[in-house]
Structure formats: C-alpha cells, structure tokens
Amino acid sequence: MFSSMYLNCICIHGLCVSVSALLPPAVTTIKAAVLIQRWYRQYVARTEMRRRYTWHIFQSIEYSGEQAQIKLYNFLGYLMDNFTPSSTERNLISHIFRENDVCWDSEWERYFCYKNIEVPEVYSGPHLTFPLTVEQAVGLLEAFRNKKQLHSRYVLQLLLETWKLLRMLPNINRISTCHSKEVTICGDLHGQLEDLLLIFYKNGTPSLEKPYVFNGDFVDRGKDSIEILLILFSFMLVYPRDVYLNRGNHEDHIINLRYGFTKEVLTKYKIHGKRILKLLQKIFSWLPLATIIDQKVLVLHGGISDTTDLSILTKVNRHNYVSALRPPKRRNHSSAGMSIDIEIDDDLWSTSKIYQRRASLTYPKPLGPRECFHNRSLQDFSTRIKANMENELENSKRREVILAATLHRSQQDILSVSTDSVSSDNAKDEWRQILDLLWSDPMNQDGCVPNEVRGGGCYWGPDVTEDFLNRHNMQLIIRSHECKQEGYEFCHNRKVLTLFSASNYYDVGSNRGAYVKLGPDLVPYVVQYQASSMTRELTARQSVGRTERSALKVLREQLFAHKSDLLCAFKKFDTKNTGLVCLIDWASAVESVMHLNLPWRMLRCQLVTCKTSDGMINYYDWFNELAIKGPNTDHIDQSLLETLYRHRSTLETIFRIVDTDNSGFISMEDFRQTWKLLSVYLKMEITDEDISNLAETIDSNHDGSIDIDEFMEAFRLTDKKSRLERGRSMFMHTTSDLTKLESDPNV
Amino acid sequence: MAPKKDPKAPAKKAEPAPAPAPAPAPEPAPAPAAAPAIDLSSVKIEFSADQVDDYREAFGLFDRVGDNKVAYNQIADIMRALGQNPTNKEVSKLLGNPTPEDMANKRVEFEGFLPMFQTIINSPNKAQFEDYVEGLRVFDKEGNGTVMGAELRIVLSTLGEKMNETEIDALMAGQEDENGCINYEAFVKHIMSV
C-alpha cells in the first residue's frame, strides 16, 4: 500500500502531489497543458522575432556609421592628395594626415614631457611612482571605481612607460599555457568600465598565475575609455609577460574622432588632452596585431581573409599604420634624418608638402576589386574637384618657384628625396593585411568578399577558416569586433569564436558580455555576465521591449533625417500624386533610400501609426508623425536642417578635426570653411546666408566663435531625457572630481 | 487537440500499462509514427500578395545561413512568430515526421513553407480566451478562480509537449501570489497580451 502510494505521487520541486488528486478527465488536462505550452512557445517565438529585428536595427546603424566615417576619411584624404584648396582649408584638416615617423624619439620625448606638470595639493586622485607596483595598479582600479580621475602628469608618465614597453613587443605575441595556467581572453570593452570591473571581480585581476589577453576596441562609445586604457596599461607594465593587448579597429585616431574617445579625453583633460591624444596615437600604432596561444589558437580583433599571411604580418612595421584606414605613403627620410612631423615645424611641413603634392596631382591608378569600396566615394565627387584642379596646378607651380628660392639647405634635403608618393605594391599588400585583421567579419557562405557594410576588411567564409587553420597548423580563431547577444558565438564549425565583453552595448538589457578561459587542453570555457543588477531583474520581454523602443526611436530619427529623399522615392511610385502608396511600395522606397536592409514590413506597424485606408499609407501624414520639433529652427532652410540631422556625426567629426587647438570652439571663419567642406562632400549648395543663419541659432557668443558642443546640442533630435534613458551617450559626463579640478589650470 | 482521423494509424489506442499509472493516461491521439505526411502540393494558397510578402520577410529573418532556407526545427517558431499556435506535433506531421537529425539538418525554402503555413492556418484548432480559461479551470480545485502554481508546474513539465524548468519559470514569473496561487483569468489575459 505504501508503495502504491508512491506510485501515485509525483515529486517535483520537492513537492509531493498525489496524482489521483490531479484530475479526472485526462483528455481535458492534457488539452489544457498543451494549450498553455503552445501559447508559451508562441510568446517565445514572437519575442525572439522582436529581439532579432531590434538587434538588426542597432547593428545596421552602427555599421553604416563606421562606413560613413571611412568615407569621410577617404574624402579628406583625397582632398589632401589631389586638391590643394586655399591654404586655410588645407590647414584645417592637414594635421590629421601627418605621418608619424619613428625617428627622433628624443624629440618626441621632449614634447611629451610630463616633468614640468605640477600636481596641485587639492588633487585627491592616485599618485603614481615608477616602476609601477601591483598595489598601485590595484589602487588605480579602486580609484576609478570611486570615480576619481588620474592627473594628467601621471597619465603622460604612464603612457610613456607603456610606449617604451610596446615598442619592444613583436607584431604577434606568442604565449603558452603550462600546467596550471589558464589564459583569460576578453573581447571589446568600448569604454565600459563597469564590465571590466565585473570581469576582474569574477575572475581576479591579472597576475603571474592569471594571464590575460585583451582583444582590442578598449575605447569609444562608452564613457570611461581612458580609464580602461590606464588600467590595462598599468597591469601590463606590472606583468609584462602576463598581460597582452591586441589592437582593435577602434584603436585608431580617425575612428576616435567620431565615436567619442577624442572627445572624452579632451573633456577630461582640458589642458593636456591634446598631448595625451598624440601619445596615444603612437601607442595605438605600436599595439601588437595578434596573439597566438600554444601555437594553436589565434587571437585577433577582426578576423582573417583569404590572403592573410602570418609570415608577412610578423614582419611588417606595424607602427607605420597610425590609422589602419589609410594606405601608407613611402617613407621619405632625408639624409639629415630629420623628422618630418613635428608640431614646431608646422610651416616647414606645409611647404614641403606642397612641393610633394604637385607630383601627386594625377589620379591614383584604379585599384583592384578588393579596394573598390575604398575608392568608391572618391569617384563621386572627383568630377567636382577636377574643375578646381587646373587652377590649383597653376597656383602651386607658382608657389613652388617661390619656395625653391627661399628654401633652406636642410629643407631642400627633404625635398630632393623621392617625390613619388604612390604606395609601392609591397606596402599596399601589408596595409591590406592589417586592414583585414582589424575589420573583417565571418560569414556563413564560403568565399571571401569585401566588407561593404562596414567599409573595411572583408567577409570570410568557413572554407577560408579551414584553409587558414590547416596552413598554419592551428585549431581555433578567437576574435571580437561584433556584438553578440550572449556575449559570444561560435561559427564555422566551432572553429571561430566571437567574443564580446561589453554588456548592454546597444541599450540596457540588450546583450550579455563574456570572457573565455583557455587551459592547456585549449578547450574554451566561456563565462557570461551582465553589468548592472537592473538588467538581471528585467524579464526577457521587458528587456526586449526597452531595447526595441530605443531602436525604433533611433530609426525614426534616421527616417526623418532622410525626408526629402524618401519623398522623392515615394513620388516615383505615386505617379498620380495621390499622396498614398501601398505597403509594398512603401517598403521598397524606404529600403532604397535607407540601405539598412531591415524588415520594413514587420516594422511598419511600429513606424507608421497614422490611419491607412485599405492598406495604403499616406506619406505626408507619416512625415508629420515623424517630425520632431527642434529648438527655434524656423529661420533655417528645411533641406539644410535635414542635412544637419542626417550628417550630424560627420559634421561633428569635421568640427573636431578643424578645432586644432582642441578648445571646443572654432572661429566663425573656420565654421564657414567647415560648411564649405561639407558642401563639397555632400554635393550640396550651401550659401553664406545659410551658414550665417545656422550660426545665429547659437547666439551666445558674439565674439565670433562657435561652441561646438552647443551647436551640436541645439540640433540634437532627442531630448536629454531619452538620451540618458538610452543608457549610452556620446556626450560624456565629467566625473565629479573634475568639477574640483576644472578651476585648476594645470589639469 | 483534435485527434486526426487516420485510417492507416495503428488501431490500438494507447492505454496505460496495467499497473496504476503514476501519470494520467497518455495522449488520446497516439504518436502518428506510421502516418504519411500531408500532401502539401495539394494545398491551395489563399494568402494575399501582401501577406505573402510579410511572411517572406519573417522567413528571411530566421535564415541564419543565407541560403534563403530555414531549418526544419525553425519552422514551428516562424509560424508562431507569425501569430499561429501549432503544436510541435502538428508541425512534425507537416514535415513528414522527420528524425531529430533531419530536424536539425534539413532545410526548406519559402515556397515549401507556404503550404505548410496555409495548412496550419486552415486547421480548426484556434484557441480563444475562453478555451484557455476552460483549460485552466480544470485545475481549479476549489472553484474559486485560482489554481495552485505548483500543480501547474507539474502538469506543464510532465504532460503534453513538455516544458523544461527554465521555460516554466519564465512563463510563471510574477504570476503566483504569496500562497503560490494563480488567478487564472488574469493569467490568461497576461498570456494573450503579447
């Protein structure tokens, strides 16, 4: 009897329930159960669907931003090479193209000297002494956790030490796990200090027993990029054989201009920010390109291509690639060995450049198919520029004559050396290797195609992985570069592992972060986490809902910013001018303008809420729905306003480039020049009156200078609240200590 | 779930083993082990062009390989994402009762998916609010509008198309009151409010 009692019981969750008490008609029970189960699975599927397209939205916009940045850089580069505008304009942007030469470290060390920077009494952050100890490194962690800021003197000192160390490292680090050592590998951190702190909390800080590899993209987007760098560098200085850093595509000053790192540093370090950034440029170029573990596991930031060759990569002069976005020029070393790139020699540099540029006024030869994307945007405006070239040719010929007559002997040394600035094939090949390493993404199909979504590197397939691993006798590639919902993802038959360590990247609750532990068995053991307790408490549905609302808001902004193009596209379908389009036409038109490859039909319910009559969409109503009122912008021409919204990031980037003294202000004249540059880039007419009207919007300064932040703020589409809500802001807030330091002229 | 009349199915209705079965009788409709697949080519597609485009878009979202196809084991989810509510069994039948390997490896293109979807849409098993409530009322011992969360858990994990612990936890999150009871009308409203 006892046993039959047991047979009649089900024990689940420690709860014993007598089955006979459960129910009579078995059919009904089961029917009920199945009903609920079906419903639940539907709920999961629909939530997953929403999550997928939300993800898609964020990712598309992120990658198209990267593409836009590359295009902008190419445009500016093209100007530099082929079009010598009046000297003011060229000087506005030339400084970002100065190549950094290795020679004369002593000159550089003079420029970066921190010794005369005094640390005031009132400073309450950490004090560093060198050589660094582990206690100091840990102290730095604590200080940053408590929102302190490291004084610029120590920053420069630490960076100089880092630079010295990095110069001694090979392009490809080789490490081995031995009996007890497990290597921990982390992916993108993107300035998210909370995630790094969480990793160290869960896994321990780096030490002799606990080696770490950090796989690039330490900076940009998050608000604590500099703190992350300082922590990683300090641990690397303390444990140089146990902390390895790989370069990512964001360790690049051109990218930093758009994605927030430059701004962060300049905001936090008002006086010495520029120097810090310059030093970081060198440091970034000296970061190793990859790490190999036990000769079997390759760790690098982006990926590989069908031409990746480790033997080439081992030999390149990696520091020549200050930015991975630009093919290198042939180095011109004069016999005097003079450094071509020092601030002090501004005029010298610009005059010698003019001479060199004359020789390069011909169009660069058309490159092979892999480089097509690189040049595509250049051809767009080349016709416009060509007209000016003939004039400029005349002007520069005249200048050259004057130059030759007044040039100094030593200067002539530089000039007499080869003026051929077209890259040799070797250098181009090297450049492509590095570009692929930092920018590529895996794809599911076989083959290797240019990565046109991002604008750099390629998409590589499982066959390329297979071939590569066989050729190099390896078994696994660990890379980062792409955000993954679970923080990691295997692909290519588990031969490629993507690792992403910035949780909540797109928005609060959007994704987890992960790190990987690798022991001598080389079997990856993944650990996931998610910063911020708030996210853990959200249910899947709430978290998806939040992120979805955020993504849709961003998308609506983008759509609004493309209003004129969309209107044109709609009119093409609406030949009878009824103001209505059917759904299928709406979706085609929107995709043809936005190029985001999103599921527009699915998004339609969220994006178009105005009433439609029998499935038609009234697009004028729709635009009204999307329209967002900015501050007093009525006096500004509508299409100009739209340009502003659409190219906000590009505009801001150009402003930052133009603001050579990094004061956050540019003169009215430079403001005009910037708009002229933009008008060429966008092939738009912008009149002087338009520009004056724009300047008027920020009326605060009557002294003839424009506050960049205020200007951008005035044209922000989102109100402050929702920006904060989004959880990710390109506008970094200053640390609380900064307000104390703000009045201090030494910081 | 209406048992499908199938002349070829084994006549034996599965009755529990002689011992007092610990679980209630298994499903009235036996697993159609030998049942042939539904003849999809004879299904008439009645969707409008707009609807087809909608479905094609959703289908594309699930294609993670880029070959314009989806795996067998994704079909049920796509249908659910599009608002239908098939049981795994129904879908399995549509696919010709594939083996687990087939479910993971075989793929179907959009044109093959459409008739399957049409079949599901045509099938009469649409659950309304009342059906759910009725179903849950079964567990309402005291007839007071509540069910014991614990009982529900047991049932969901042992009967029908079993759910695992994580799924059940996610489903019931925040639904039980301090006594472990669930007001099932509210529960159903919650269920249907996605």
Image: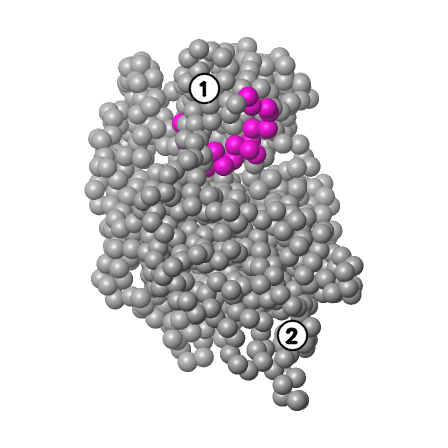
In this view, the residue in front, A18 or A362, is A18
Tell me the number on the disc at residue A570. Answer: 1
Residue numbers of the magenta segment:
A589-613
State the separation of the CA atoms marked 1 and 2. Answer: 64 Å
Q: Are marks 1 and 2 on the same chain?
A: yes
- Residue B12 picture location, percent across and down: 43, 70
Residue A230 among those drawn in magenta: no
In this view, the residue in front, B171 or A94, is B171
Q: Secondary structure at mark 1?
A: helix
Give the residue at mark 2: A19
Q: Chain of mark 2?
A: A
Closer to the chain start, of discs 1 and 2, is 2
Tell me the number on the disc at residue A262. Answer: none
Q: Quadrant of the N terminus of chain A?
A: bottom right
Q: Residue at x 22, y 31 (%)?
A: A366
**Within-10-Å neighbours for mark 1: few <14, some 14–19, many 20+:** many
Q: Chain of mark 1?
A: A
Q: Quadrant of residue A355?
A: top left
Name the residue type under label 1: Phe
Q: Is residue A438 visible?
A: no
Q: Residue at x 56, y 13 (%)?
A: A637
In this view, the residue in front, A234 or A340, is A234
- Of tags 1 and 2, which is closer to the observer? 2
Q: Quadrant of the C terminus of chain A?
A: top right
Q: Secondary structure at mark 2?
A: helix
Q: Residue at x 35, y 38 (%)?
A: A452
Q: Residue at x 48, y 62 (%)?
A: B29
Decide: is A710 above or below A725: above
In this view, the residue in front, B72 or A719, is B72
Q: Quadrant of residue B110?
A: top left
